[in-house]
Image: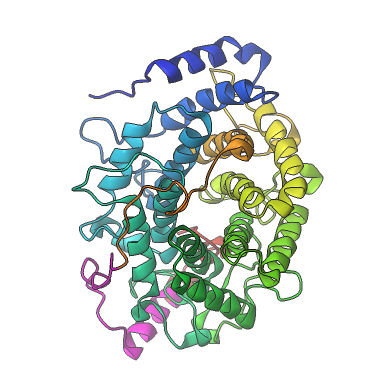
């Protein structure tokens, strides 16, 4: 059995962190942040077994009932670790990240592996695409020339989601939550699926300089406002709505990662358009709403589920994306930095303070505002605090890079085109197909699917 090995730099940082754990984690200096992040990165990867003999590279244990985690969360984890590498310089896990990201691309190199079809949503594919995009923006080491390249993978995800087969006349546009029409949730159009598509397009526009990506992103934003999933007055982002009501039954639950994926995309649009006033205004408004809603008292808080104690495994990872994506907003839309950075710092301080659980006395929980370890443990909880601590270093990072300014990843504008229906055998969606999907959905609702089954990523 292969075990996780830590090369010298990571081992040294980890040893220092272990020796100082009695005093708790610290983020008072860049060196302290790196020591803290090193220990948490190690603890996070104890949930991963894909590098062991007989295990599947790239995935966390699951999906339920085989384990707690759906496929998408591993893609999010690799993005967190790509950021960790870029911000701390610790390359201990780069080979594991590389193996994982390439193993899960699927036969058509578009992050639609056949074995996850039964729970494959546009948002799931989108998260892997965003991590590939991040690898290009951060100048993560490029794969061997005979393997898929980071930029091309991001373009493949974008191209499959821009395919007309993913869009239809229901609700006047937008993409659905699920990709195969037989999946539960195919009749739901939600903000995270469309947000990943919007965000990826904005970042591809900035990286490549190709305005066709930004055009589609702008159309997606306009559709969100038109249908009411993005409140035109406040820019609150609501979860989603069903196509059989023409998206009039809007679920107004607000999740932090919905706000963050749209806010970061808006900031990239601001950057790409050289400070266009429309995108400046949108970035400022959606960020201010997000800070007010998801950082009460300056500490990250998952509004829709934390107080009630109803957070699913998926939701237990959202604070990390909130921190990571807001740290990038402060960089690509620097007029927001003085507003964002102090709040990220106070939230990260609360995050590391409560990492006192477990036999190692440094396991991280979820309720940061409580000030004490709450007993909630998992990959998402460790990922959150790793993101919150390491993201504090982003202000000193030279990226995110572009093709003209330091980026080295190779792209393929045609990646993913023509492969959308091949791995999934989707074919053209007919009216009867849609009716069948709706029937299946209603059937499952009738036997007790709870509210959160239709919200966000809870699959």
* Residue at position x 70%, y 24% in the image: 28
Residue 189 vs 40, above or below: the answer is below
Q: In the depicted view, which residue is nearer to us: 229 or 105?
A: 105
Could you tell me residue 207's position as x and y percent? Answer: 46, 58
**For the magenta stretch, what is the residue range?**
414-442
Could you tell me residue 381's position as x and y percent? Answer: 56, 38
* Residue at position x 53%, y 44% in the image: 399
Residue 359 vs 228, above or below: the answer is above
Q: Is residue 241 visible?
A: no
Residue 94 drawn in magenta: no
Q: In the depicted view, which residue is nearer to us: 137 or 344?
A: 137
Q: In the depicted view, which residue is nearer to us: 6 or 354?
A: 6
Quadrant position of the N terminus in the picture = top left
Query: Looking at the image, which residue sits at the far top?
Result: 19
Query: Looking at the image, which residue sits at the far right?
Result: 297
Q: Is residue 407 left or right of residue 296?
A: left
Could you tell me residue 144's position as x and y percent? Answer: 23, 42
* Residue at position x 51%, y 50% in the image: 314
Q: Quadrant of residue 218?
A: bottom right
Residue 423 drawn in magenta: yes
Residue 389 vs 428, above or below: the answer is above
Could you tell me residue 58's position as x and y percent? Answer: 32, 42
Quadrant position of the C terminus in the picture = bottom left
């Amino acid at each position: 059995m292969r075990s996780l090995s830590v090369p010298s730099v990571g081992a040294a940082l980890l040893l220092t962190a272990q020796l100082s754990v009695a005093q708790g984690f610290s983020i008072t200096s860049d060196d302290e942040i790196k020591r803290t992040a090193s220990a948490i990165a190690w603890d996070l990867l104890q949930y991963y077994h894909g590098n062991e003999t007989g295990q599947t590279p790239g995935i966390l244990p699951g999906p339920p009932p085989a384990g707690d985690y759906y496929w998408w969360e591993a893609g999010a984890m690799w993005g967190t670790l790509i950021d960790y590498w870029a911000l701390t310089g610790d390359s201990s896990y780069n080979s594991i990240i590389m193996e994982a990201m390439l193993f899960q691309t699927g036969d058509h190199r578009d992050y639609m592996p056949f074995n996850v079809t039964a729970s494959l949503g546009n948002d799931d594919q989108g998260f892997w695409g965003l991590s590939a995009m991040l690898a290009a923006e951060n100048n993560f080491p490029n794969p061997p020339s005979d393997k898929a390249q980071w930029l091309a993978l991001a373009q493949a995800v974008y191209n499959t989601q821009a395919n007309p087969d993913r869009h239809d006349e229901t609700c006047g546009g937008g993409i659905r939550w699920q990709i195969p029409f037989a999946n539960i949730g195919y009749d739901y159009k939600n903000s995270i699926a469309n947000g990943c598509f919007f965000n990826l397009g904005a970042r591809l526009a900035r990286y490549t300089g190709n305005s066709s990506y930004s055009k589609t992103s702008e159309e997606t934003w306009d559709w969100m406002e038109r249908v009411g999933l993005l409140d035109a007055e406040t820019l609150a982002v609501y979860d989603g709505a069903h196509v059989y009501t023409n998206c009039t039954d809007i679920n107004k639950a607000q999740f932090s990662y919905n706000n963050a994926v749209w806010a970061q995309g808006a900031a990239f649009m601001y950057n790409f358009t050289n400070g266009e006033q429309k995108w400046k205004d949108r970035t400022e408004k959606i960020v201010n709403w997000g800070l007010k809603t998801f950082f009460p008292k300056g500490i990250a808080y998952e509004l829709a589920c934390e107080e009630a104690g109803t957070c699913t495994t998926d939701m237990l990872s959202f604070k990390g994306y909130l921190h990571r994506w807001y740290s990038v907003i402060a960089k690509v839309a620097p007029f927001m930095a003085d507003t964002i950075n102090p709040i990220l710092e106070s939230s990260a301080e609360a995050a590391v303070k409560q990492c006192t659980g477990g036999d190692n006395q440094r396991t991280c929980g979820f309720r940061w505002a409580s000030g004490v370890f709450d007993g909630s443990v998992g990959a998402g909880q460790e990922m959150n605090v790793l993101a919150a601590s390491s993201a504090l270093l982003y202000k000193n990072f030279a990226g995110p890079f572009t093709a003209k300014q330091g980026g080295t990843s190779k792209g393929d504008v045609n990646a993913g085109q023509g492969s959308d229906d091949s791995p999934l055998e989707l074919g053209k969606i007919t009216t009867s197909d849609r009716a069948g999907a709706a029937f299946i959905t209603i059937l499952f609702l009738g036997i007790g699917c709870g509210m959160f089954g239709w919200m966000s990523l809870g699959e």
